[in-house]
Amino acid sequence: MIKVERTPCPDILKVGENPNSVGESETRDAILFYSNVNNHTDNFKKTGKRGIRIKESYSIYSEKIVRTTLRQFHFGKCAYCESKINAVYGGDVEHFRPKAGYGSNALIKPGYFWLASDWNNLLFACPFCNQTNTHQINENGVIEEVVLGKLNQFPLRTETYRLNYTHGQMFLADTPNYEIAYSLEETERLLLKPCTDNVERYFKYEDDGRILPSDGLDQLDIEKANTSISVYALKRIGLIQSREEKVIQIKAQIRRVEEAMVNFSNHINESNEVVTWFEGILMKELNILHNYKERNMEYAGLSRFIIEKYFDQLI
C-alpha cells in the first residue's frame, strides 16, 4: 500500500456549484430521505421525476467519468493491495466510509449516506480487498480458510465519536461543525486510508511476501496496521505469493546492479571511453531497479521497502 495523490473532483460530484451538480443533488436527496427516522433501516430510494420515491438507490458514484478518473489516478491498481486489476476486471468504486451501513456482522444503519458521492470518500479497489470472500491464509505454518474483505467494515477504537445521521444532516447545512465532528472521528479511525495517511511507514515486508507492521510503531499505529492488514485481506495466500514473485524480480535486478558496480570498479582506471561505457551500464541497471518504486508499478510499497532496505544495508 502506498499513499495515492487524489486528482481534482469530477464536475458531476462537485459541491457548491450553481446549479447543483448531480452528485450534490443526490446527496441532498439522501439527506432528506434519512431525516425521517422511519427510513433509517431502509435502503435509500431516490426521488423520481414525478416526486415519488423509486427503487433505484445511489447511482452517481458509479458513473463512467468517476470510475475512469479513479482508475487513472490509481494507475489501474487496487488502492489497498496494489494488485493490477485493469486487465481482468473493471474494478470496484470503493466507499471508504460505507454508505449503506457499517459493521462486520450485523449491519448498523443508516451508514455514511451523505458520503455516497463524496469524492474524498471514493477509492478504486479489487473485489478481494473490497468485498468479502473466502481466502486461504497461512497462520504459523497452518493453512486456514477464512472470510476476509472490507465490505461494510469501518472499525473505530471506540464509538465515542462515531458520526451518525445527525452529522449527515450537518454535512451541507453546517459545514464548520460537521468538520469538527469529522476530525474527532478521524482520531478514532483504525483503517489506514491511502489518500490521507502516509501508509508506507506502517508496513514492512518479508522476502516471502508477507506484510507486517513496521518496527518502531507505537501501540495505536500497530493496531491500525494490523486492523488494515486483516480488514483488507492483505495476508491472503494468493497475494503473498504475488508479492514474493516481485521480491524475486527485485533481488535479481539487485544482482545485476551489483555486477555492474563490480565491472565499473574494475575498469575505473582505464580510458574515459571505457569508464563512460561501464558507468552507462551501471546507471541503466540502477534506473531499472528504481523503476520498481514508481507509483504506477504493481506492489510499489513492497518494492520501496525492499530496495531502500538494501541500500541502507549497503551504506
Image (cartoon, rainbow, N blue to C red):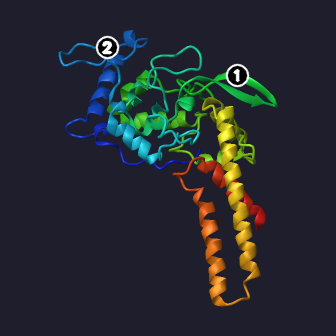
Q: Quadrant of residue 83?
A: top right
Q: Residue at x 68, y 46 (%)?
A: 245
Q: CA distance from mark 1 to mark 2?
A: 37 Å
Given the image, on which type of amino acid does mark 2 rest?
Lys
Vertical placement of residue 314 versus 135, above or below: below
Farthest right residue? 141
Question: Disc 2 designates what residue?
Answer: 55
What secondary structure is found at the residue carrying circle 1? strand
Residue 43 % position (x, y):
39, 15
Mark carried by residue 88: none
Lower position in the chain sequence, tag 1 or tag 2: 2
Specify few, some or many for label 2: CA neighbours under 10 Å numbering under 14, 14-19, or 20 or more.
few
* Labels 1 & 2 near each other (Cβ < 8 A): no
Q: Residue at x 24, y 40 (%)?
A: 17
Q: Residue at x 63, y 31 (%)?
A: 233
Residue 279 % position (x, y):
64, 78
Q: Is residue 139 visible to us here?
A: yes
Is residue 189 toward the left or the right of residue 308 in the image? left
Q: Quadrant of residue 149?
A: top right
Q: Is residue 225 visible to us here?
A: no
Vertical placement of residue 162 versus 313, above or below: above
What secondary structure is found at the residue carrying circle 2? loop
Q: Residue at x 36, y 32 (%)?
A: 61
Instruction: Specify the quadrant that holds the C terminus.
Output: bottom right
Residue 188 % position (x, y):
59, 33
Is residue 264 toward the left or the right of residue 48 in the image? right
Farthest top residue? 38
Given the image, on which type of amino acid does mark 1 rest?
Glu
Residue 87 % position (x, y):
48, 40
Question: Disc 1 designates what residue?
Answer: 145
